[in-house]
Image (spheres, grey):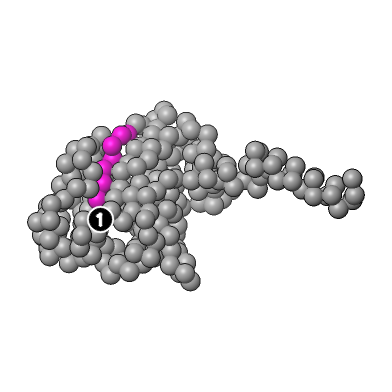
Amino acid sequence: MTTRAAIRTWLAFGAVACALAGCGGQEQAAIETVPAYLPSAEALWRLKRVVLVELDRRDASPQVARDLSESVFLAVQNRRVFPVDLMASGSAAPIEVTMPVGQGPRFTLEQLGEMRSALKCDAVLVGAITGFGSYPGAWMAVQLWLVDLRNGRLMWGVDHAWRTTDEATSKRMRRYFASAAGEDESDPLRLAEMSPRMFSSFVAAELAQTLPQPPGVVSSEPRQSPAAKALAETKKIFTN
């Protein structure tokens, strides 16, 4: 066998070995990311205004639903994919948006027209907390959909559950809160397990990360990151 032929053989063998082992971490990275439905990124970038309706609290307290809704609003806003406003529960909303249990984002043409006219937006973000468990072994299941009010089509959606007992999830949580913790010796993951607000901050960040940004756009991070703010508030609660 010539030297060139030997090199080609070893390169082919290496390529097969890398594919089987997930070389470069690409396969592992794909496993660890949150799956999302996204038929067209460009369609999201053309939206002029989106309204996030406070999430339904089907299996959580009103405060948990409120915390997650506010966290999602800030995370999506900082992502700068499209302009977004929050319609909180109990506010002077021009219209009530309700989601039938188990039917997903299904609206009649009449409902779509009413929402578009009342909210003056192109699309709505609607969803629910479909499962929630507190410490120990905290977890949260969320459904979130972006519905085009002009035609009723689903533009983006996530249906996922986050469990602190899941190894991949706990690793991502540690990375998320690492910069916020700094040299603090407290365990952010343990605090997040006990604090729905901290957990909501992490879930919201992962939800927003599945929204593709337009070319040339970067996230607009506030002075104090959501992770740092949630960590500081949680520590204040548990130390007082």
- The foreground one among 191 and 199 is 199
Q: Is residue 24 above or below residue 52?
A: above
Is 187 one of the magenta-colored residues?
A: no
Q: Is residue 193 above or below residue 84?
A: above
Quadrant of the image containing the C terminus: top left
Q: Which residues are magenta?
A: 126-132
Any part of residue 209 in sight: yes
Q: Position of residue 43 (x, y in %)?
A: 34, 64
Q: Is residue 182 above or below residue 49?
A: above
Disc 1 target residue: 153
Q: Residue at x 49, y 39 (%)?
A: 169
Mark 1 secondary-structure assignment:
loop
| Left or right of residue 183: residue 217 | left
Q: Position of residue 165 (x, y in %)?
A: 47, 31
Any part of residue 229 in sight: no
Occupied quadrant, residue 18: top right
Is 129 one of the magenta-colored residues?
A: yes
Q: Residue at x 36, y 37 (%)?
A: 140
| Left or right of residue 94: residue 128 | right
The residue most toward the right is 2
Q: Position of residue 181 (x, y in %)?
A: 53, 48
Helix, strand or loop for the magenta stretch, by majority: strand
Q: Residue at x 13, y 52 (%)?
A: 108
Q: Position of residue 210 (x, y in %)?
A: 42, 53
Question: What kind of residue is marked 1?
Answer: Arg
| Left or right of residue 6: residue 227 | left
Quadrant of the image containing the N terminus: top right
- The foreground one among 226 and 234 is 226
- The foreground one among 180 and 149 is 149
Q: Residue at x 52, y 45 (%)?
A: 30
| Dot 1 crowding, Cα within 10 Å, few <14, some 14–19, many 20+ | some
